[in-house]
Amino acid sequence: MLVLLTLGLSCSQPEPTSFVLITIDTLRADHLGAYGYFRPTSPTIDQLAKEGVVFENAIAPIATTLPSHTSLMTSTYPVRHGILSNLQFYDQPVVTTSEIRTVAQMLRAKGYATAAFTSSSPLCEISGINAGFEVFHGPPPYEADQSRIDVPAEITTDLVLGWLSQASHPFFLWVHLFDPHHPYKPPASFQSLFTTDTALDGVLRERHVAPRFRPKAAKIINQYDGEIRYADSQIARIFEALKARDLYERSVVVFTADHGEGLYENGIIQHGWIYNAQIRIPLIMRFPDGRRGRVTQIASLIDVLPTLAEEAGLPLDTKYFDGVNLFREKREFALSQREHRKPAWVDLNLALTSLDWKYQLFEGGEDLLVDIRKDPHETRNVLDEYPMMADRMRREIMALVVENGARSPLVVRDSIPPIVIEQLRSLGYVD
């Protein structure tokens, strides 16, 4: 369902529109006030939600930083662009081609100034995510021991404000803040902002966190929420700078995340998996034409660019996009896959999410069908109760994998795992 109020909507933009993209690492949608959270973690983000369009059911295509951002920046599924983990594990940087290009490459070719400021090593320059950016500030790559360098949000924001002070319009600005990623250590003034109370205890019970883990989960969530509030305060600084230069109203602003975080839900602390805790993310778009509202249909990160191309007039070549315009086409399913740390054709840990159902296909384990309407935290497998729905969603998963994997330009499928061949043959996709 789409609930949308449009103020002063016109079919064409009177001038080129700048594009501000803010991504927060590891941010669950359900820890923001705009998505119903009980704590005041996000006053700036909540205000943005009131001024724009909130997509209530946005899904990440993979719960890992580099591949998820690659999908966002190219409107392609991971199985197509071939980035299935961060660079230090997969040893595959982002590679662009005539069919897979980043939004920065496309906008720069149209005369936009392009700048990116990232806060963690998975999005360093050698990852390839810098393609198309005239200005790119990111941390160094991982060290030999795989330790990363994380830049506090305040330092990244300082760099952003310096660039904005002299930026020419139109521009594409991407800001990535690493907080609230593990190890959950907000600045001192935010460490005691949230404490365990009966409301948090209720959230842990609602999420079916095992009783023995609840004290640890509560401690982590208090710090996690403090980091969200810290990141929110830095976003406020960016918005203030945009307004001071009369750029806020002339820009389309997109706020989202690469993935969520387990926080002991489903027995998982961090991310990389395909449960809702890891793949359900915030997605908010603020348009210069003043439209606002809430969209309940399923959305994917790969839909951001095609939506902006038509609705905000960004000069993007949509011919090879996998996503859809969320205002003009109804997405029934969103495909996600688990992080895969060794080059292979595809990792058969996949998920398909609709408004009502969630199907998880597990390599080497029992598949999972969940009635999301009754069981949003994915605690009960109803696979045997709804075999026709399970079969339909399983076939849809494999069709999407085959279609998009066949169009991948990267040499990431030297040998197709036998289990994949078996699955494809059983569904009639190979002889």
Image: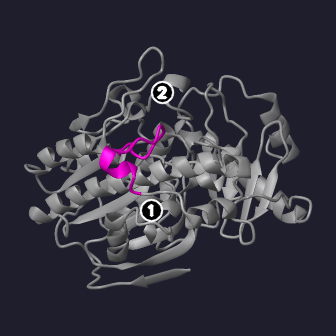
Compared with 350, 55 (above or below) is below
Query: Which label belongs to residue 147?
Result: none
Residue 365 on the magenta span: no
Q: Nearer the viewer, residue 379 or 293?
A: 379
For the C terminus, the image quarter is top right
Q: Which mark is residue 87?
A: 2
Relative image position of residue 425 (x, y in whole percent): 85, 41
Which range is magenta?
A: 177-193
Name the outermost residue toward the top: 144
Q: Residues within 10 Å of mark 1 (few under 14, many from 20)?
A: many
Q: How far apart are marks 1 and 2 (CA)?
A: 25 Å
User: In the rendered image of this protein, does residue 55 appear above or below residue 154?
Assistant: below
Q: In the image, is residue 170 above or below residue 366?
A: below
The residue positioned 10% from the left and 63% from the top of the image is 244
**Residue 23 seen by the camera:** yes
| Residue 319 visible in the shown view | no
**Sequence-wise, which precedes: disc 1 or disc 2?**
2
Task: Please give the name of the residue rendered at 35% of the width and 30% of the height, measured from the top-left corner.
Answer: 124
Marking on residue 283: 1
Q: Are marks 1 and 2 in contact (CB under 8 Å)?
A: no
Which of 253/147 is in front? 147
Q: Please give left or right for residue 331 compared with residue 103 in the image.
A: right
Could you say which is closer to the camera, residue 146 or residue 245? 146
